[in-house]
Amino acid sequence: MEATPKLIDLVYASTIDPHRYDDLMACWQVHLDEVLAASPQEGELDLEAGQPEIERHFNRAFAILERLGRQGVEGRSLGALVDGESRPAVLVEPSGRIIAVNGRARALFGVSSGDKVDMLSLEAAGLSNIRKALGRIAEEPPGRLLTVTRVLSPHDGSTPIVALTRAPAIGDRPVALLSVADIEWSERIGDLLRQVFGLTPAECEIARGIIAGLPANRVAKERGRSEQTVKTQTKSVLRKLELHNQAELVRMIAGLMQMDAAPDLLGPAGRIGANGRTTIMLAPSRLLDVSVIGPLGGRPVLFIHGMLDGHGVTRATRSLLEERGIRLICPVRPNFDRSSPDGDAPGAPWRFASDIAAVMDHFGIASCPIIGHMAGSVYAFAAAARLGSRIAHIVSVSGGVPIVSTSQFATMPPRQRVVAHTARFAPKLLPLIMRAGIALLDSGGDRAFMRALYTSAPVDFNVANIPEVFAILRDGYRFTVTQGHRAFEIDAHQVVQDWSELAESSSQPVLLLHGRSDPVVDMQTVRDFAGRLGERAEVIEHPTQGQLMFYADSGFALDALERVL
């Protein structure tokens, strides 16, 4: 079947306008469906053999995208830079002029591009600090927190905390991002305030209410105290912390929380902190990054990420890990983020098993369970098969299963199905599909990318639209494409194969945790997989969640994990 003129036009249009990616994928899916419908027998289709014209155009378009290179921050529109933020956010020049506003900030604060930051209803001291910070942003590195303050919303009367952060430069223009701060009370901060500054539990609750933006009468009502008592306790908090006003308290707590959540802090003697990152040198001259989430001294569990998810977890998950004393050791697979490449797709899971052994040696782990999240499940089974007793238990969370029949693709949402069909039947055409998707992400199309994945899956779509979860997913997309399309391409190859032999080469007990509303891996295929594994496998079904189960209800997964620790 020959390529349609529309398909060829869209192949090239997507190289010029990344936001035509959805149109390309929709047209390509129609073409694939027509070819598959005319296929004589399942599993015998070779799309590449009969369609050299399509391959030629796909390869040319891929070459164009590679020649154009990756689009950095400087190449994105100003609107795209703030639209990617899940919170109300504005971009500000050193002069104080607002140059971009996302819809959430426009609704909450009533400002537009071209306004001055002075038009925000800021505290006097806060406005002064923002002006001073804007005057020095050219000297600060991207990502540096410059100051925090409160702002009054004319929309609903709330007083959220906003943080001013140095943003990546736009060309040679230094800019700052002013956004509603993602600040929530941490019990560790409460412990610090009690132990170091002598705050009572009641005073910590007062500080917590101030951070939440609650007025004194609201705090009094919630605590069953008089407003005068709350005001007296507030003065006591400020006196013990040697602060002059609530604005200084907000800035102090925000600074402590940023330190508490800092991802790259190392403990003494090079030991990685409670939530940190380290790099392991592997022979020959390969680097493997490892993230750690959870308390020092926590029970270790290996966590193998999937194709697009990275290692982000919600605040609720971090709290649960602390409470339960569980420490996730999360190696970054080759080609993802900053980990060095390691060969082509064939044999990738088996090679990565050796990397996992090196990670366990580095952290002094003799044996522990392994979690395979989404596409990470094939790598978890490979590690179990190769490392034997060092892997105590396999826990698959929303994991993929071996593709024993191409009919398994039929239940997938459209976007995942077109990628699966391409990876299985036309792998030489996959690089353009991946590379054009990266161009969309680079141009600020994170939300469009997410919508295409989950629009037809209402349970996951609702979860993905939770601001905290969307930020995790957005970071996961970028985690995957940091080095280009290879990580995506290699994983796409793995997840569409029948890797039953790899799974059956392991002997450990297996927990398969899966949401009944998972749109990508049908629940029945998980049950069938468990049946082929025999008595060592147990399926635990979440009655209401889908593929994003770990973000929506991590307690469900951790409850099951507790059984094998």
Image: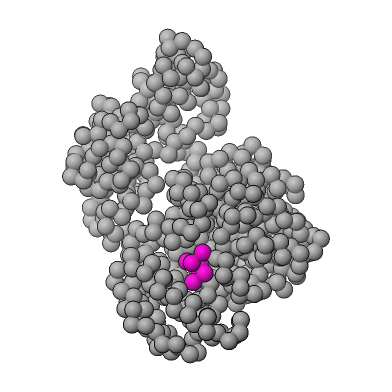
Please state which of residues 214 and 383 is positioned toward the viewer in this rendering. Answer: 214
Task: Please identify the dominant SS of the magenta region.
Answer: helix
Check residue 392 for magenta coloring.
no
Residue 435 shows in this picture: no
Query: How many numbered badges does the structure rendering display?
Result: 0
x and y percentages locating residue 417 in the rendered image:
52, 69
Q: Is 77 displayed left or right of 532 in the figure?
A: left
* Picture quadrant of residue 144: top left
Q: Is residue 119 above or below residue 357?
A: above
Q: Quadrant of the N terminus?
A: bottom left
Magenta region: 413-419
Residue in the image at 72% along x and 45% along y = 562
Please state which of residues 539 and 87 is positioned toward the viewer in this rendering. Answer: 539
Q: Residue furthest right?
A: 535
Q: Colour scheme of this structure image? A: one colour
Q: Is residue 219 above or below residue 321?
A: above
